[in-house]
């Protein structure tokens, strides 16, 4: 149909529309490549600059124009200097990893359970509770921050891991409850019904049938949450200042503060180091991302 | 006949009787939902009420809260730090939210174009988002630094005057706004939305002779409105709470030029230990957010298109 129309409206030489279509295809592909290239160059420039600087000596960093992208000679001296400037880096990394892993476990368990109830079980008040959950997604964290702190302070838990862990074991992540619910709704109900007829109880259906299918949603949840714990300055400042809990975000924050003494090279080197675990997580989980977002959809 | 109908109705009543079945259903549901319920009660419901109460008190955590009525709220408009933080935040929201969503949309469009190497491009496009904010903050401080910074180097290369960026009390918030727009927002949600648009719609439009722009205007945009609504809401709430980068890079300075709402709440509460005052601010933030969410939801009926299922 479309070819006939094109041929009628724009006769294009001997081969008619075919040639025109091919040429326009090549042009549009080239334009797409150029646009994608510009976008990627602009987007990746700071990251490249960080990595490049971290491998340069102090004398190279001082050179200004033209910008030197390839370190010559490359050196790991900045990494050594940065690591030694603060002798607690290993501890910060340990704390951040413990926070990320410990809270992720709770988050995955509690949000999958809640999401399952909202998506695949029928009980009175379900819609109302879901509306509460959606409302909480839009609640600024500052509103609950102070009473939560006072609550934990009264229970004498400030200075321990409890305040930063417990909420995630109680599904205090409305966004992920919602994500899980959307994802689980997309799985055909017939699967559950068939298992129910075979005499499987609700917990069995959940564990044996549904959980194995939720990998993409769990991948999104873990990647998002681990990044969030890595980036969560507010919780870190309120609860995690003691040295035995201090996460790398606070370590790097004080590093930014003393950049005059440390120098740009070591600062960039430590920035690269803090990024590596997250890049790693994304690298392994990214193939699930678009799939998960597609399945969840955004309809009511 | 009538009797059997009545019997049937009675039977269905007892089978689906609201109380009996409801209780039974809740008994099955509870193991799944109990963590969520406890979490909502202890970490949302109680804190929301408590913070509302603290907003009417003077409270330094060490002593009991003292009721002072509306005093905190009366003080706010006269607190020039608060007014400055509110102004900065409103400017940030007004510019950075639409800007970063437009960039995120564009990014998603580009990554959705069918070209060879698409998978590689998608992976590369995810990289900037994985850089932890503390590392990104360090890099941006370096990029915007007056001496060997990247931006000034580029300006020198183009023979343009260099700037002081983060050291300038007026320009500093625009650096943060620029950073947010540069990063884009909601790319993954947009990308998933684009992939969910049925290809038949594009084919049909093409048959009707619609050009690139018409297809974008009349197929892509309407089909993407649910994603836009979602990203707009999340982006707006996030932007009203924006403070991490300024906290890491400039501590709100110079002269409060990058002090934002979230930052001032934190400072009032956890640096000056004025929990009552901070709670009052948090509630103002809450009300502003709720107002905008309400406005967007109200208007969404007019511009969000839901495909009939």
Image: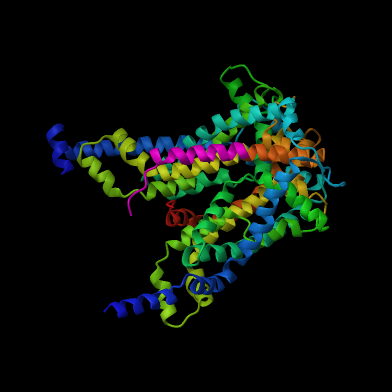
Question: In the figure, A166 relative to B67: above or below?
Answer: below
Residue at the far bottom in the pictured view: A199
Task: Give yes or no for residue B176 being in the magenta stretch.
Answer: no
Relative image position of residue A41 (x, y in whole percent): 51, 36
Relative image position of residue B70 (x, y in whole percent): 74, 35
Q: Can residue B128 be seen in this snapshot?
A: yes
A300 vs B150, nearest the viewer: A300
Hey, which quadrant is residue B53 in on the image? top right
Q: Can residue B253 be seen in this snapshot?
A: no
| Residue drawn 43% across the image and 73% down it | B16
Hey, which quadrant is residue A188 in on the image? bottom left
Relative image position of residue A68 (x, y in whole percent): 62, 32
Kindly report the secondary structure that dominates the magenta region of the rendered protein: helix
Determine whether, in the image, residue B263 is placed left or right of residue B208.
right
Determine whether, in the image, residue B54 is placed left or right of residue A216.
right
B161 vs A120, nearest the viewer: A120
- Please state the extent of the stretch shown in magenta in the rendering: B287-309
| Residue drawn 72% across the image and 54% down it | A96
Q: Quadrant of the N terminus of chain B?
A: bottom left
Hey, which quadrant is residue B168 in on the image? top right
Determine whether, in the image, residue A175 is placed left or right of residue B39.
left
| Residue drawn 59% across the image and 17% down it | B160
């Amino acid at each position: 149909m479309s070819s006939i129309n094109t041929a009628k409206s724009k006769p294009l030489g001997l081969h008619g529309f075919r040639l025109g279509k091919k040429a326009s295809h090549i042009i549009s592909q080239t334009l797409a490549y150029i646009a994608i290239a510009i976008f990627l160059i602009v987007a990746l420039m700071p990251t490249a600059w960080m990595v490049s600087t971290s491998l340069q000596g102090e004398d190279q960093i001082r050179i200004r124009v033209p910008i030197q992208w390839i370190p010559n000679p490359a050196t790991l001296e900045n990494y050594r200097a940065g690591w030694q400037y603060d002798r607690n880096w290993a501890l910060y990394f340990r704390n951040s990893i413990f926070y990320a892993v410990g809270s992720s476990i709770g988050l995955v368990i509690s949000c999958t359970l809640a999401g399952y109830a909202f998506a695949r079980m029928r009980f009175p008040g379900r819609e109302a509770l879901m509306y509460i959950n959606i409302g909480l997604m839009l609640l600024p964290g500052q509103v609950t921050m102070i009473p939560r702190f006072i609550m934990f302070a009264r229970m004498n838990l400030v200075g321990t891991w409890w305040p930063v862990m417990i909420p995630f074991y109680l599904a205090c992540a409305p966004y992920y409850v919602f994500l899980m619910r959307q994802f689980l709704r997309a799985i055909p109900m017939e699967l559950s019904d068939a298992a129910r007829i075979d005499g499987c109880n609700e917990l069995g259906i959940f564990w044996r049938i549904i959980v194995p299918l939720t990998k993409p949603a769990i991948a999104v949840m873990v990647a998002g949450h681990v990044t969030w714990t890595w980036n969560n300055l507010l919780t870190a400042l309120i609860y995690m200042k003691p040295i035995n809990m201090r996460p790398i975000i606070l370590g790097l924050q004080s590093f930014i503060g003393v950049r005059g003494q440390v120098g740009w090279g070591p600062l960039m080197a430590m920035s690269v180091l803090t990024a590596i675990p997250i890049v790693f997580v994304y690298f392994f989980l990214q193939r699930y991302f678009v799939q998960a977002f597609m399945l969840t959809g955004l309809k009511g | 006949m009538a009797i059997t109908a009545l019997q049937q109705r009675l039977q269905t009543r007892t089978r689906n009787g609201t109380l009996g079945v409801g209780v039974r259903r809740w008994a099955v549901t509870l193991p799944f939902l109990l963590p969520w319920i406890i979490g909502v009660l202890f970490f949302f419901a109680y804190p929301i009420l408590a913070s509302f109460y603290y907003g009417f008190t003077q409270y330094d955590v060490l002593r009991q809260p003292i009721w002072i009525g509306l005093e905190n709220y009366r003080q706010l408009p006269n607190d020039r730090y608060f007014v400055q933080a509110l102004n900065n935040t409103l400017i940030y929201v007004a510019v950075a939210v639409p800007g970063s969503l437009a960039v995120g949309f564009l990014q998603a469009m580009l990554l959705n174009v069918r070209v060879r190497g698409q998978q590689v491009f998608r992976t590369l496009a995810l990289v900037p988002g994985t850089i932890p904010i503390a590392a990104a903050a360090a890099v941006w401080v370096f990029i915007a630094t007056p001496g060997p910074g990247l931006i000034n180097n580029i300006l020198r290369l183009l023979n343009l005057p260099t700037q002081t960026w983060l050291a300038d009390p007026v320009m500093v918030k625009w650096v943060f706004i620029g950073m947010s727009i540069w990063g884009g927002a909601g790319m993954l949600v947009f990308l998933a939305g684009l992939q969910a648009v049925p290809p038949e719609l594009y084919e049909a439009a093409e048959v009707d002779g619609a050009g690139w722009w018409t297809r974008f205007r009349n197929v892509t945009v309407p089909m993407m409105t649910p994603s836009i609504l979602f990203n707009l809401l999340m982006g707006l709430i996030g932007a009203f709470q924006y403070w991490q980068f300024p906290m890491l890079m400039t501590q709100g300075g110079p002269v409060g030029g990058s002090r934002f709402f979230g930052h001032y709440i934190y400072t009032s509460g956890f640096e000056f230990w004025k929990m009552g005052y901070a709670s009052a601010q948090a509630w103002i933030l809450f009300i502003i957010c709720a107002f905008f969410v309400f406005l967007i939801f109200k208007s969404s009926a007019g511009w969000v298109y839901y495909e009939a299922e």
